[in-house]
Image (cartoon, rainbow, N blue to C red):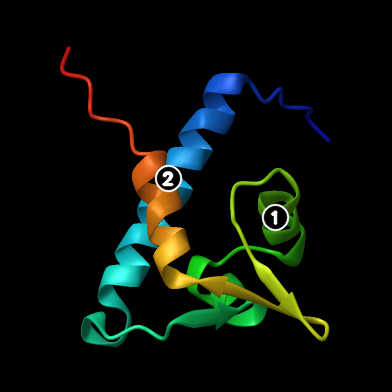
Amino acid sequence: MATSIITTDDLRDFKLELIEDIKKLLLKHNNGSLKKYLKSSELMELLKISPGTLQNLRTNGTLPFTKMGGIIFYDVEEIQKVMHANRTPNEIQ
């Protein structure tokens, strides 16, 4: 099996792609009438990410969350703030 090296540029590109995917899904979902909170399973389905990736986003502080009785909820407005805060303008070369 071939080994591939992941660089910081690769991680940054992945982050930007993930943020764009979140943005598209939030804008598209239910014609703009989103629920106030999403459960982990709903967010994973929307973003097409694994439980481990979602855990990493929580652990490293990228996605704020609320835990109530074993269920983790994500505020849609907070997700949008995270996307906006991590937005990088396109560079024209």
- Specify the quadrant of the image occupied by residue 65: bottom right
The amino acid at mark 2 is Glu
Give above or below for 5 relative to 70.
above
Q: Looking at the rendered structure, which numbered label has been put on residue 58?
A: 1
Earlier-in-chain disc, 1 versus 2:
2
Give above or below for 59 relative to 33.
above
- Specify the quadrant of the image occupied by residue 35: bottom left
Task: Name the spot of residue 93 as percent of width and height, x first.
Answer: 17, 12
Identity of the residue furthest to the left in this view: 92
Question: Residue at point 36% right, 69% down?
Answer: 25
Crowding at dot 2, Cα within 10 Å, few <14 / some 14-19 / many 20+, comes out as few
* Discs 1, 2 touching: Cβ within 8 Å: no
The amino acid at mark 1 is Arg
Element type where label 1 sits in the image: helix
**Could you say which is closer to the camera, residue 85 or residue 89?**
85
Residue linked to disc 2 = 17
The residues bearing labels 1 and 2 have C-alpha atoms spaced at a distance of 18 Å
Element type where label 2 sits in the image: helix
Question: Residue at point 51% right, 40% down?
Answer: 15
Task: Name the spot of residue 66 as percent of width and height, x first.
Answer: 67, 71
Task: Name the spot of residue 77 as percent of width and height, x first.
Answer: 40, 66
Question: Residue at point 66% right, 51% down?
Answer: 57
- Specify the quadrant of the image occupied by residue 43: bottom right
Task: Name the spot of residue 20 as percent of width and height, x first.
Answer: 36, 51
Question: Residue at point 74% right, 75% down?
Answer: 67
Callout count:
2
Q: Looking at the rendered structure, which numbered label has been put on residue 50?
A: none
**Could you say which is closer to the camera, residue 48 or residue 3?**
48
